[in-house]
């Protein structure tokens, strides 16, 4: 064959895929064509190992305006003529190599996906996972990623309103860095990305093109990462100040009728933006690489087409309006150049002056092969699931105090203030529930409405049972929204997995997607956008299967919202859901890993109960019954109660209960479908009526008051002391 296996490996193409390209073209591809195929047929752009699985997701709903895959992000109608645009993407591999720039450009990329569609970005969130902070390399990655996110987002003036951070050996040297962005737009002003209308002009605006990011999509995001390989050149370098100008200029341009569409240059750079735009517009395109402004000398057409230099946009301008478009961008001190035009022949034609260096049908480039593998449940998983959790020693009553303190100080449970202090979450003055709650809430100016959002995932649960873990990720995200009073309207996701060509990894991917899809259908929540990040392996070790859910909810009245902290002396604390002393609550729990050093067991989820608990909580908030609401998750019931006491700055005294089985299960088990609420005595009857109507158990747990946290016979600690441990746990781990 005319190209070597090494050449194909460099762009993540197999020999079989190369033969297919030759067959479809009827000839050998040019170097530029081969690079374009490598990028667009990569996992990152072509979803060749995941697309068939993603078809399981429900994608339609009464509010859905733009479905998954139709544009750069999904769109949902929130009423009053407005829509929200949101999406989540990964920047795992770049962040493993250059944590600051990898994370920063991840933020920049997801923001461009939003304002490209004419929406003003109003909120950022993130979902992060790292190896244990006891290792210097992991501390370096953690600090760099957090710094990169904070630096880029703060410069843009977009509030970072929440997210999650998790630590496990499964993510050592291979962090998961998922960025979420949400924007708002008048739905009549939605901008599409398609390139249509023969003779309309392709205009490139923003940064000059360099060699940074070469092979980012194909060489970095679509194969396993080996530490010894030098891939720093594949990591992009960001300029947030330039992106801020692009935001304002593109939003102003969206108000005109001068353009057909806008597309950002992300993964695969000019190749993906131009080919995808032509594909969505049902057209062809022709561009001249000599007209692309460059910041480096000696760049080849291959370099220009595959560069992933940041802060660049492709504008499809109506013929005759190019001077108006240029004038607008120059007002914002942005460079803009006509680099090509829309054609009607369905071809991607790349020229270097008069020389044609690539000429390929758009349809071939945009249709990568799709693979479906045989799945195999690994034997090690069966062994983990069958482990007898009752064989673990129960916690002695005298160790309950110390165990609670250890859990509260664990980096996975401790306050993430150290992280979000580095983010500006109040810019824009719309944030009404800031980071640290179950979900963030932002008011929609000019209305009584508010948008709630959360990111959630648990790799441990998915590792132990991919199907149930996938469903639990959806359920917990929706539960977080229920705790603030919001009705879920749609999700985006980021699917972070190892090498899908391994049967055990493909099994994890398929089962997680199947579980997520089932939960979405049962809960009637469509998936409108997302991203797949595969090949997250370092030295043959895959990360936990980690599907992350970004979920958005709607509050019709921003004043009818709820927060985590206990509010007032004498309030009664109740549990919506089962107290649960089932041993399955210990499966995959923080308690079992921290105290017993094991990740084992098989988690369980009752979706019907979950739906009922959430409905009861939302209705109780709507009726103004609740003083507080808090999701019971990591660390279990006692950790959740402690957090409500700490955040509220007030004590709690639990009712006496009779221990009927193990002590650790009701205290620290993480069974889902449970929400802790507080309310006045006078409102308990009304809450009972709601719980009964939703088919949900309601149990009194205790009363708010004093300055101590007391579970009679087991725990008696000062709330102030709990707070010091909880607030200082993460920083202590960094020392």
Image (spheres, helix red, strand yellow):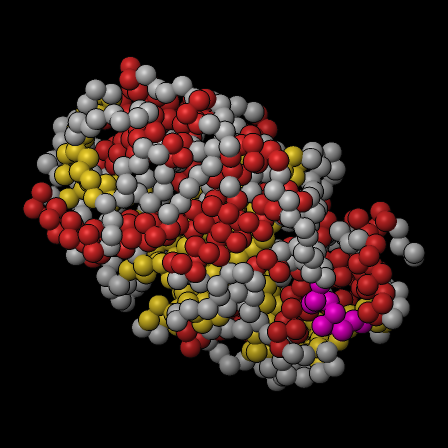
Going 14% across and 39% down the picture, which residue do you hit?
572
Going 38% across and 35% down the picture, which residue do you hit?
585
Residue 531 visible within the image: yes
Does residue 666 show up magenta in the picture?
no
The image position of residue 479, as x and y in percent, is 34, 49
The image position of residue 570, as x and y in percent, is 10, 36
Q: Nearer the viewer, residue 514 or 151?
A: 514
User: Relative to 433, is 66 above or below?
Assistant: below
The image position of residue 630, as x and y in percent, is 28, 42
The image position of residue 78, as x and y in percent, is 35, 68
Residue range corresponding to the magenta coloring:
359-368
User: Relative to 216, is 24 above or below?
Assistant: below
Does residue 361 show up magenta in the picture?
yes
Q: Quadrant of residue 646?
A: top left
- Name the quarter where the N terminus is drawn: bottom right
Residue at the far right: name it.
1
């Amino acid at each position: 064959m005319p190209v070597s296996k090494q050449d194909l490996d460099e762009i993540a193409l197999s020999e079989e895929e190369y033969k297919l390209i030759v067959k479809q073209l009827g000839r050998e591809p040019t170097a530029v064509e081969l690079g374009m195929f490598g990028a667009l047929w990569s996992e990152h752009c072509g979803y060749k190992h995941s697309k068939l699985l993603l078809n399981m997701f429900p994608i339609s709903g009464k509010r859905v305006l733009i479905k998954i895959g139709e544009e750069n992000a999904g769109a949902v109608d929130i009423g009053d003529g407005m829509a929200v645009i949101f999406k989540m993407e990964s920047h795992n591999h770049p962040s493993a190599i250059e944590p600051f720039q990898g994370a920063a450009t991840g933020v920049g990329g997801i923001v461009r996906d939003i304002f490209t569609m004419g929406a003003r970005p109003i909120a950022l969130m993130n979902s992060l996972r790292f190896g244990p902070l006891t290792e210097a390399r992991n501390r370096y990655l953690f600090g760099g990623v957090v710094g990169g996110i904070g630096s880029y987002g703060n410069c843009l003036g977009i509030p970072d309103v929440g997210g999650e951070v998790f630590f496990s050996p499964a993510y050592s040297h291979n962090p998961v860095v998922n960025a979420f962005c949400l924007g708002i737009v008048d739905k009549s002003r939605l901008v599409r990305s398609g390139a249509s209308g023969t003779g309309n002009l392709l205009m490139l605006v923003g940064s000059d093109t360099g060699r940074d990011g070469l092979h980012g999509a194909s060489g970095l995001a679509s194969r396993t990462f080996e530490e010894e390989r030098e891939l720093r050149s594949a990591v992009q370098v960001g300029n947030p100040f330039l992106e801020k100008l692009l935001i304002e200029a593109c939003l102003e341009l969206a108000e005109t009728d001068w353009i057909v569409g806008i597309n950002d240059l992300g993964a695969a750079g000019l190749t993906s933006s131009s080919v995808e735009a032509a594909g969505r517009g049902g057209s062809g395109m022709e561009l001249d690489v000599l007209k692309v402004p460059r910041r480096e000398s000696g760049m080849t057409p291959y370099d220009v087409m595959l560069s992933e230099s940041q802060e660049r946009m492709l504008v499809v301008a109506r013929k005759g309006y190019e001077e108006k478009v240029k004038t607008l961008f120059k007002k914002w001190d942005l460079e803009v150049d006509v680099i090509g035009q829309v054609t009607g022949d369905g071809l991607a034609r790349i020229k270097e002056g008069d020389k044609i260096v690539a000429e390929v049908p758009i349809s071939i480039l945009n249709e990568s092969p799709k693979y479906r593998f045989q799945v195999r449940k690994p034997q090690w998983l069966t062994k983990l699931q069958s482990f007898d959790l009752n064989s673990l020693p129960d916690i002695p009553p005298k160790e309950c105090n110390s165990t609670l303190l250890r859990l509260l100080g664990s980096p996975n449970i401790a306050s993430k203030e150290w992280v979000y202090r580095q983010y500006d979450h109040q810019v824009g003055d719309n944030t009404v529930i800031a980071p640290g709650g179950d979900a963030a809430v932002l008011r929609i100016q000019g209305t009584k409405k508010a948008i709630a959002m959360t990111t959630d995932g648990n790799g441990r649960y998915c590792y132990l049972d991919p199907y149930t873990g996938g469903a639990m990720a959806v359920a917990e995200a929706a539960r977080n929204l229920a705790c603030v009073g919001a009705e879920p309207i749609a999700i985006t996701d980021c699917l972070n997995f190892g090498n899908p060509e391994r049967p055990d990894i493909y099994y994890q991917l398929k089962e997680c997607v199947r579980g997520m899809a089932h939960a979405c259908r049962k809960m009637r929540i469509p998936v409108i956008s997302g991203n797949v990040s595969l090949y997250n392996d370092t030295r043959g070790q895959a990360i936990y299967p980690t599907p992350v859910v970004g979920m958005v909810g709607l509050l019709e009245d921003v004043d009818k919202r709820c927060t985590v902290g206990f509010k007032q002396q004498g309030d009664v604390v109740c549990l919506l859901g089962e107290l649960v002393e089932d041993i399955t609550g210990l499966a995959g729990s923080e308690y079992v890993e921290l105290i017993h050093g094991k990740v084992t067991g098989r988690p369980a989820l009752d979706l019907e109960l979950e739906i009922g608990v959430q409905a009861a909580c939302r209705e109780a908030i709507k009726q103004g019954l609740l003083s507080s609401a808090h999701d019971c998750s990591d660390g279990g019931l006692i950790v959740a109660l402690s957090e409500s006491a700490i955040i509220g700055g007030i004590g709690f005294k639990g009712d006496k209960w009779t221990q009927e089985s193990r002590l650790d299960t009701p205290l620290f088990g993480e069974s889902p479908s449970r929400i802790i609420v507080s309310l006045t005595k006078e409102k308990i009857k009304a809450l009972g009526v709601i719980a009964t109507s939703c088919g949900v158990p309601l149990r009194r747990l205790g009363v708010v008051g004093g300055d101590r946290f007391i579970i009679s016979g087991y725990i008696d600690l000062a709330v102030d002391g709990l707070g010091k441990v909880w607030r200082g746990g993460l920083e202590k781990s960094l020392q």
